[in-house]
Image (tube, rainbow, N blue to C red):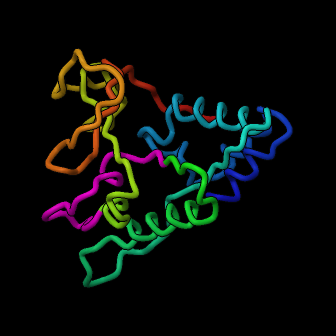
């Protein structure tokens, strides 16, 4: 995936950048979740535009190709993600590393009974990370359950909260919430 993101960032035009993403057959835009959504494409295009405007940003893939090891319950892909994030931090110790992943990878505690074992963020010293969960304040998300489409998100967090709420959440899984209010679904797209 990294060569694809590098080609996307270096492309001479937005059309060429989109073509670079679309050419990767195992990339994010073949999945029917947030990785292949219109919102993700827009985020990637904005990061690319920032880099083209001279901002100091780097885009790094963190989906390892780690195999599940027979006889082990720990997902080594999670450990490999954490190593990749750590290498980014070590390469530029004065920079901030912002990692955008699904909720499960950003949890800071072991998932009891899960074949995942320790999520990626739990492999990093807790005082060196700030892990946020998106507040569940209603709205809709694109999901593939029995069928794919917009599905309601239940309100499980205070619907009046807005902004960054730094307080332990979900028994220490997260350091806080990012409260944006009700969200809108973003369907999959092809770049």
Label count reads 0
Residue 106 x %, y %: 34, 51
At x 27%, y 66%, the residue is: 118
Residue 96 x %, y %: 55, 49
Which quadrant is the C terminus positioned in? Answer: top right
Residue 3: image quadrant is bottom right
Q: Is residue 56 above or below residue 191?
A: below
Tell which of 36 and 113 is nearer to you. 113
Which quadrant is the N terminus positioned in? Answer: bottom right
Extent of the magenta region: 99-118
Tell which of 116 and 144 is nearer to you. 116
In-image side of 54 versus 24 (left or right): right
Residue 157 x %, y %: 18, 27
In-image side of 5 versus 134 (left or right): right
Q: Is residue 67 above or below residue 188?
A: below
Residue 167 x %, y %: 23, 38
């Amino acid at each position: 995936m990294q060569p694809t993101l590098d080609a996307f960032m270096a492309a001479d035009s937005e059309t060429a950048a989109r073509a670079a993403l679309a050419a990767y057959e195992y990339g994010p835009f073949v999945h029917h979740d947030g990785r292949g959504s219109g919102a993700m494409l827009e985020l990637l295009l904005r990061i690319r535009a920032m880099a083209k405007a001279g901002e100091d940003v780097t885009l790094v893939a963190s989906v390892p190709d780690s195999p599940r090891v027979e006889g082990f319950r720990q997902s080594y892909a999670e450990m490999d993600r954490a190593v990749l994030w750590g290498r980014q931090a070590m390469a530029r110790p004065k920079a901030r590393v912002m990692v955008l992943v699904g909720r499960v990878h950003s949890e800071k505690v072991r998932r009891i009974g899960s074949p995942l074992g320790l999520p990626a963020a739990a492999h990093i010293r807790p005082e060196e990370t700030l892990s946020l969960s998106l507040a569940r304040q209603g709205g809709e998300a694109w999901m593939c359950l029995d069928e794919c489409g917009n599905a309601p998100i239940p309100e499980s967090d205070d619907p009046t909260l807005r902004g960054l709420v730094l307080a332990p959440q979900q028994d220490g899984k997260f350091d806080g919430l990012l409260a944006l209010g009700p969200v809108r679904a973003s369907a999959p797209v092809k770049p």
